[in-house]
Amino acid sequence: MRVEIEMGTQAKGLPAQLDLEELLATRLLVQGNSGSGKSHLLRRLLEQSATHVQQAVIDPEGDFVTLADEYGHVVVEATRSEDDLTRIAARARQHRVSVVLSLEGLDAEAQMRAAAAFLGGLFDAERDYWYPMLVVVDEAQLFAPAAAGDVSDEARKLSLGAMANLMSRGRKRGLAGVIATQRLAKLAKNVAAEASNFLMGRTFLDIDMARAGDLLGMDRRQTEMFRDLERGHFVALGPAVSRVPLPIRIGPVVTSSRSTSPVLVPLPEQPPEDAAGLIFTPGADEPRVFRPAPRAPTPSPTADIMLELARSRPASLGAPPPVEEPDDGLSEEERQQAHQEIMRDILGDPDAAYRTHAILYQDFLVRCRIRKLTGAPPELPAFRRLLAMVRAGIDPDAGDDSASARAIEMAARLTEDLQGIFLLVAQAAVAGRPCPGDAAVARAYGTQSLGRARRLLAYLEECGLIVMRTDFRGQRVIAVPDLGVETAPGDAAAPAPVTA
C-alpha cells in the first residue's frame, strides 16, 4: 500500500510528499544545528504518519510526550529498570502500541543504558510481532557517539550496538530508523551510513557541511547554502522524498513541545531599593527547604586517628603507667547489645543517613565513652557491617540457619556501600513487609537521589541477587531467589519511613 504524507512545501509552493512505505525500507537521517527546526520536522513526521504506522520515540528531553494527548502515544518513563524497559518494548510491539520513551532527568550514561535496553526489546521481539514500526531517535549523537566521552565504555558499547542494530538490521524486523542529530561529525559513521534518505538543515561548521555535502552528492561550493537556510527549511534527498536535492519548508504541527525558544520580554519596573527585599525576604507561601549538612570527604584517615586515640599511647612517646578502667560490669553479650542500642540512637537522627561512616563512627566512639563501656570497640569494618544490619532491622545474633544470617553472608560478597541496600531489601522480604520505596533505598545508601537508588536496585538485579517485578496495581515486588522469599507489594514512590 502506497501512503504519502505531506511534510511541507517546495520552493514553488508544491507539496513536498514523503513516501512512507519507502521510508520504512530505507531509513532517514535528519541533521540541523540547535534552532534549525529539527525537532519540529520530527514532530511533523510523527503527526502525519501517526494514523498509518506504529511509532516509538526515544526522547532525551521529554519534548514529544505531548503526542500522548492528541494521538494516544503511551509515555514510558525511563526511571524503570533496564529489564522492565526491555519487556515493555517487547509488549509494545506485540500489541502495536505507539510509545514515547522519556529520558528526561537522567544523566548521560543512564540515558544510554535505558535507550539501549528499550531498543533491544524492540529488536529482539518475537518474529510473529515484526509489524512495521517507525523508530525516531532525537539527538542521536548522544546514543551513537563517534568518539568516547565521559560515560563508561560499557554503556557506550551497549548504546552504540543498539543503534547500529536499528539502522543496519532493523529493516528485516520491521523497524525503520529515523535519527536526528545536531552534528554529523559527532555521530558514529557506521550508524549514519545506513540511512538512504536525508533532510539537511542549517549548519555552520565546515566539517559538518562537508559530511552533509558528501551524503547529498554536492561539491564544496554548493554546501555553503547550508549556512543560509532559515529555521524550518531543509534540503531533502532520497528515494522516499526526491531523487535530486530538493529544498523544502516544513509545514505546521498540531502538538507543541514543552520547551520553547527564549523570547525577550520587558524587565519589570521595580525600584532598586525594593529589589533587595524581594530576594532576601521569603514569601508567605514559600516552602522551606532543609538540606542535610554537606558530606565530608573520604574520612578513613580520621577514623584511624580516632581508633588510635581510643587505644594506649605508643611506647615511643613514653607511655605512662596504665590506668585501670572501672569495670562496666557487663558481659560480652550485654556489651554488644549496648553497642546496638547506641547504633539505633545514632540512626534516630534524620541526618544520620547522609553522614559518612567515619563521622558516624566518631559519634559511636564518643557515646561509648559517655556510657563508660570498657573493652575494645569494634573496628571500622565491623562497625560498617553492624550499621548495615541495624539499618535493615536484622538481628546480628540470628542463628546461622536463619534467612537473615544467609542474607548477611550474601551481602558480604558485595562492596560495603551496597551491603546496606541489599540487607534492607532482603530483610523486608524475609519479614514479608512491603517493598521499600526509592526514598528508603536512597537513604540506606546515603544519598537523596531517587534515580541513583533505582539504578542501584537495577544493578543488584543484574548481579542476580534480586528480581524486581510490578503487580497489576503498579506496586513493586522484589524477590531474593537465593533465600526463596519476596517482599509484599509496595509503592516505589513512597517516602522513607520516619525513624523514631
Image: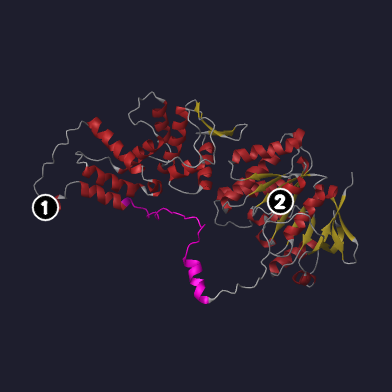
In which quadrant of the rendered image does the C terminus lie? top left
Residue at 26%, 36% (x, y): give it: 338
Residue 23, image x, y percentages: 82, 50
Query: What whole-number distance in Å separates the C-alpha atoms at marks 1 and 2?
Result: 76 Å
Residue 330, image x, y percentages: 19, 32
Q: Which of 328 and 469 is in front in this view?
A: 328
Residue at mark 1: 318
Whether residue 124 is visible, yes or no, is no
* Amino acid at dot 1: Gly
Tell me where the magenta segment starts and ends, as one range: 272-300
Q: Which residue lies furthest to the left in this view?
A: 321
Q: How is the image coloured?
A: secondary structure
Neighbours of disc 2 within 10 Å: few (<14), some (14-19), many (20+): some
Q: In this view, does 262 lie above or below 482?
A: below
Q: Which residue lies furthest to the top in this view?
A: 401
Element under disc 2: loop
* Amino acid at dot 2: Thr
Q: In this view, does 89 lie above or below 219?
A: above
Q: Residue furthest front?
A: 284
Residue at mark 2: 66
Q: Is the magenta stretch mostly helix, strand or loop?
A: loop
Residue 403 left/right relative to 475? left
Element under disc 1: loop
Residue 253's image quarter? bottom right
Q: Which of 232 and 112 is in front in this view?
A: 232
